[in-house]
Image: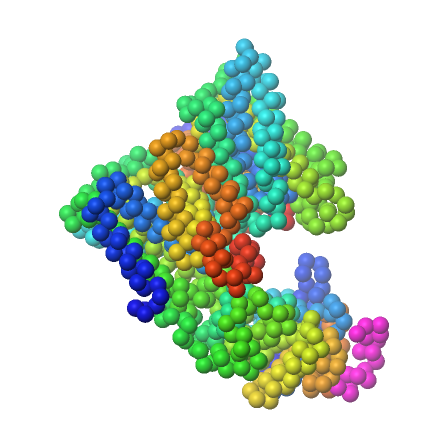
Amino acid sequence: MIHSKWFWPTASIFILLLILPLFVPRFYVYILALIYVTSLLAMSLNMVVGHGGMFQFHHGVFYGVGAYTAALMLTKTSMPMWIGFIAGPIVAALIGLIIGWFCVRLTRLYFAMLQISLGSLIWAIVYRWYSFTGGDDGIHGIRMPSLLSSLNSSYYFILIILVLCLITMYMILKSPFGNALQAIRDNPQRCEAVGINVRRYQLLGIVIATFFAGAAGVLFVVLERSVFADLLFWVFSLEIFIMCLLGGWFTFLGPILGTAIILTLRTFVGRYTEYWTLILGIILILVIFFLPEGVMGYFQEIFKPRMKGMVQGGKTIDAAG
Amino acid sequence: MLQVEAVVKSFDDFMAVNGANLRVGKGEIVAVIGPNGAGKTTLFNLITGQFKPDRGKIIFKEEDITQLPPYQICKKGITRSFQIVNIFPRLTVFGNVQVAVLSHQGRSSNLFRPAQSLAVKETKDILEIVGLLDKEKNIAGSLSHGDQKILEIAIALGNEPELLILDEPTAGMSPEETQATIELIKRLAQMRGLTILFCEHDMDIVFSIAQSIMVMRHGQTIIQGGLEEVRSNKEVQEAYLGGE
Amino acid sequence: MFGPAELISQLLVGISRSMILFIVCAGLSFVLGVLRIPNIAHGTLYMIGAFATFSITKMFAGSAGFWIALIVAPLLVAVVSLVAERALFCHLYEREHLMLLLFTFAISLILGDLVKIVWGAEYKSVSAPALLKGSISLLGASFPRYNLFLILVGPLVAIAIWLFTNKTRIGKISRAAAVDREMVGVLGINVSWVFAIAFVIGCYLAGVGGALVAPTVSITLGMDHTLIIEAFLIVTIGGLGNMWGALVGSLIFGITHSFGVLFWPQFAIVFPYIAVVIVLLLRPKGLLKSVW
């Protein structure tokens, strides 16, 4: 791996990001950390949608479940905080297993609808259960372990976890399982014919992705020290979708790029106008019309003309029925 | 090896298959022929599990496989190529076959080792047999139609099947490609002892390699037998009057 | 605990709310059936209908404003949708469904903020016209007149839609296009215009729903987001593209919600979601046959 041509550029970027908090204002450190957290979520969504070809329209639920699990365990129980951190992804993956088990029996639109309904059910319960979850106020002022008490230490923690998760995701995607998942995306019928139990693989893919989404949720709590019911609302889930799309969802790192662009734009546009949603909508339309492969996909097309005949605006998601 | 007994399948009100019988012996090359709409592809879909028959049984190596889902039927030793090209367009040629090989080796759920170093020899062997080794790094979707149909067969070989089902393997091919494919099928039967079941519209191909021929019409089996038997059968001649 | 009068009254409240949901969902279902796209902006168009009703009612003194709004607001919504369709949407029909769906999401974002720009962020409210104000006594409980009005309007709209799709030429062509758009094209009919008309009619119904709901709730930003999820779920449990399915789904949704209000007010909104989950688990393709 050390000899791969990507190693030194990647390592240098990593080192740069590590030392950044030392000479950059607090605000930018916070934004970067938020980008890390959200891009982990976007990467986990991409695993299911871009690489798995499934219509995961309410992925935000698992993010929210992970965040709320950690928050509730930290505030309502006296268990060690690290247990709350581990519980987040595990509970998210469990919910992912349950919801996923019902959804993988269906295709495309019905998959999406069932997931949206189950996810909205969870949202509705969290939103209304004021006494337990804080309802639409959410939970605030969550105390962190002393190791993570400052913004900088949170930043490092988040960055390290992000990198570990990315490495794991990369290994999984390059493994035979990852190959099979992408094959299922392109042609599930063919996969059945070569002996792959499509539903079981899809379910496993969902569980892995929701595990990472839950992890991202825990990181959110570490950064913000609070949780909101909005994390579980479907609009947020679709915003993550947009980040994946903008970055390029057939690529590995595309979602990170998409998240960085959207969050950076949102922060800086937000200084001049309160109509960020309008701008987001316009960006989305521009992407749909002119950049359906996303930013990263566009660059890939330029640098790898051999792939050009194949990369056609995500058409294969449709064919994967 | 394979027995299909009186299977019936209808879609809403349309009787696609209405009493089809088939016997395939080990090591044989068997062809299914019939006019368009006779139900050949539906029959193949029933055997490989894409559909379940309304009535009837399908027995493979003494085991009743009628109700099994496609991926289990594959594990039992039956694989197929599809009439309409059904490959993984975004993967490389190598990747296409590798998916099947890894699945056969039970390695598909392996999460931790990089896939590109696994099952390389077996995959390359298959590509060599079908003659696609020099194109292994090409993206499958960019291959010519004829090569894609050969890739279909290669993928089906990845699972080391005992019974290989080919649905119109030479459809849409040029005469040279067709000839090469016929040679390939003969080679596969001899070298690997594969049992082959196929269907074709081109009678020359059928008569040059098939040992046993089953004729279908309107979803029913008219007859199954050797070349001469079938050629001289009155019903068969009727079915083909004005046909192929 | 609750007497029969209260139960029936609550049932009727549920039904009246279902009627608004039905009108909106019929529009969504119609578009879904013909164009095969779930229109996320449908909720935002409904919201525009409500806000437009507010503005129009304010322009005219007395009750006339509401009746005028009932006619004009949906037309306004229809115009907006026509513009969006001809300018942008129709160029995307060849693309895969996911892109179209995301496009409708983008439109909902844009229109949502445009509403904020035009009308501001505070709550608005509209009062019912004099004719429909107040309540009448029904079976010993008092029942708002406006709700009675809704219960009458719902079936009228249903009949109108039925007549349109079954008796008019355009309606029949739309139904055919829903099932087989290629055939319709082969018959020499301009499919693109069929889509445009179907889309505009569907959005018009969203506007009608928005106008009708205006006197019953506070008109706020964000009402589009809550509504569209409900509408999607109703359309799915009813059967995609099926108007009667939209009716059944709306009734299930509205009635479970109103009984939720009666029995467990804090979690009232959870009841319809549970009902939806149960239906989808048992009949994932919906209760009635989908159009395709």
Tell me the magenta residue range.
B227-244
In this image, C102 relative to A46: left or right? right
**Residue farthest to the top, as pictured:** C61
Instruction: State the image coordinates of residue A197 (x, y, percent, origin top left).
Output: 48, 67
Compared to residue C32, the image places residue A204 above or below, namely below
Residue A263, given in percent of the width and then of the height, sits at: 36, 43
Q: Residue at x 48, y 53 (%)?
A: A298
| Residue B239 within the magenta-colored segment of the rendering | yes
Magenta stretch: includes residue C219: no
Q: Is residue C20 left or right of residue B3?
A: left
Corner quadrant of residue A226: top left
Where does the N terminus of chain A fall, quadrant-wise?
Answer: bottom left
The quarter in which the C terminus of chain A is drawn is bottom right
Relative height, residue C152 to residue B72 (above, below): above
Where does the image place residue C281, in percent across and percent down from the top left?
49, 50
- Which residue appears at 16% of the width and 50% of the height? A147
